[in-house]
Image (spheres, rainbow, N blue to C red):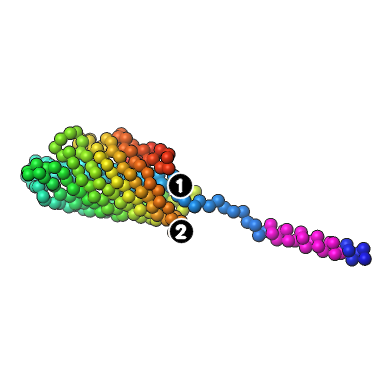
Amino acid sequence: MKNLWMSTFTFALLLSFGVILTSCDNEEPEEPQTTSISDEEIIEIVSAATASSTEGVTAEAIEMAYVADAVLEKGPSPLECGETADSTFVRTIDLDRISGSYSNYLYWGLNCSGVLPTSIFYGREMNGNYETDRWLSDDSADSDWLIEDLLTGPNYIFNGQYERTGTQESKVREMRSFSTTTLIEVQDLNIDKGQKEIESGLANFTLSGTINGETSFEHTGTIVFLGDGAANLIINGNTYTIDLY
């Protein structure tokens, strides 16, 4: 009886130990999962839609300022009231920190009151891609603008919107992929007529999309143009400074 009891006890003990081992073997360590886009990732995407080096809003603003100069130039063939014009070009990016290529189609026209120029309407269609040490992106964008203060003041004033769609892949940390739409609505963007630099302005942005083809997100924020080639991004109550060039 004693031996039978010991055998039964030993078997039960081994069975229990085996269950514990099996249970432990089945429990693999969980990897941390991020269910939404981070501020850092928002900064990467919105900065690309804003900066000149990635054909963002700043690039358009500079182009528009030169277009305004050309439209108002008193030469042999200035743009007449009510007339429109267009142009295409390809911009290749080859900098230390970024490379890429973008095709652009521009169109614009002159609005007048009588014979006096009052504003220029301007639009652009863009598509291309860029790569940095941290990021890969394939994008297209459409925009509509109105340029005012053509004949008065030291600055051109721009109002309008810019919408950029595309796919991005992070090359660092979790190396996630994104499908995104960035809408930037600009209010009173001031561009110096001489230096062709952004002096001030405000924009609201909405960034929406999916992460890894699964998790959807939408975030809104503000861009404050500071002058001297910088802007503040205000995201989720936090402020980050970005380079516009």
Q: Quick one: quadrant of the N terminus?
A: bottom right
**Is residue 12 found inside the magenta-colored segment of the image?**
yes
Query: In this figure, what is the number of numbered marks?
Result: 2
Disc 1 packing (10 Å; few <14; some 14–19; many ≥20): few
Query: What residue type is disc 2 on?
Result: Glu
Query: What residue type is disc 1 on?
Result: Ser
Horizontal placement of 218 versus 245: left or right? right
Horizontal placement of 17 versus 195: left or right? right
Residue 68 image point, x, y percent: 17, 43
Q: Residue 156's mark?
A: none
Q: What stretch of residues is rendered in magenta?
A: 7-24
The residue that disc 1 covers is 38
The residue that disc 2 covers is 214
Give whichever of 196, 209 is nearer the camera.
209
Query: Residue drawn at (40%, 48%), measured in percent from left and top?
Result: 219
Looking at the image, residue 28 lies above or below residue 156: below
Which badge, 1 or 2, is on the more N-terminal residue?
1
Residue 230 image point, x, y percent: 33, 37
Residue 42 image point, x, y percent: 41, 47
Does residue 30 appear in the picture of this structure?
Answer: yes
Q: Quick one: quadrant of the C terminus?
A: top left
Residue 193 image point, x, y percent: 20, 36
Q: Secondary structure at mark 2?
A: loop
Q: Secondary structure at mark 1?
A: loop
Prevailing secondary structure class for the magenta stretch in the rendered image: helix
